[in-house]
Image (cartoon, coloured by chain):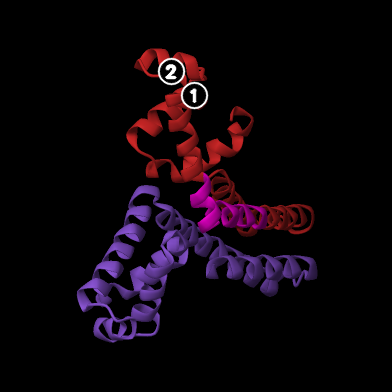
Chain colours: A purple, B red
């Protein structure tokens, strides 16, 4: 399961609140705190298989949500497009700096770049 | 229920695929085809209350998904920010047209505006 850690982190970020409290707890211990299944099992006094079932079910729920809604996929498309926009804004800023040194255009390109940088991180 | 039609359309667009086939069917007839509960009931040979239950449950599922993930809310914040970016790009385009008539800046602002307009519609 852990070879999917990056994908799972992304899914969890978007859809984690759809999980039950117990699923969230085990998921967090396993993926974020990096405990083993056996360690979690011991802490909670249940079987290793029991822990595994909870996490596998949580992953199935997260995966199903994305498969059906495609929301993360849509976000990624949007992020790619924002990156393209940012490149164009940089090109405007450079051309302005070289040829016109227009302070208004400079301020506008800076404000756009700052908004886009923030959006890209979300 | 129908006074929430706009909100429901938005929820359905994002999360509709999480509904069962029957929920989707009734939802579509009720909200998109604008049939009454009684008309749907008659077509399917079930009670009006039965149809109502299916739709109410579908709405509850959609609402819960958004309450828990906040994805549509996040999209709206992003849309607002993109609108701000678009306004700044327009300001650059106008200033360029007035003062410099730089064809490279013109092409860049046009390409940015076209990408952002598309993103705003998504």
At 64% across and 56% down in the image, what residue appears? B77
Residue that badge 1 annotates: B30
- Quadrant showing the C terminus of chain A: bottom right
Q: State yes or no: discs 2 and 1 in contact (Cβ < 8 Å).
A: yes
Q: Residues in magenta?
A: B63-81
Report crowding for label 1: few under 14, some 14 to 19, many 20 or more residues within 10 A (C-alpha).
many
Residue B107 visible, this orientation: no
Location of residue A49 by image quarter? bottom left
Magenta stretch secondary structure, dominant: helix
Q: Chain of mark 1?
A: B
- In the figure, B58 relative to A97: above or below? above
In the drawing, what numbered circle is on residue B40? 2
Badge 1 element: helix
Find residue B51 and report its horizontal and vertical position in percent. Answer: 44, 25
- Which class describes the residues within 10 Å of circle 2: few (<14), some (14-19), or many (20+)? many
- Secondary structure beneath dot 2 equals helix
B64 is within the stretch colored magenta? yes
Q: Is residue B50 left or right of residue A34?
A: right
């Amino acid at each position: 399961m852990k070879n999917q850690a990056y994908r799972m982190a992304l899914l969890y970020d978007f859809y984690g609140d759809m999980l039950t409290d117990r699923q969230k707890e085990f998921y967090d211990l396993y993926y974020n705190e990096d405990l083993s299944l056996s360690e979690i099992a011991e802490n909670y006094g249940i079987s290793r298989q029991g822990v595994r079932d909870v996490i596998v079910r949580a992953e199935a729920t997260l995966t199903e949500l994305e498969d059906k809604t495609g929301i993360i996929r849509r976000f990624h498309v949007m992020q790619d497009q924002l990156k393209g926009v940012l490149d164009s804004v940089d090109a405007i800023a450079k051309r302005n700096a070289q040829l016109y040194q227009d302070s208004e255009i400079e301020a506008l390109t800076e404000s756009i770049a700052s908004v886009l940088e923030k959006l890209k991180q979300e």
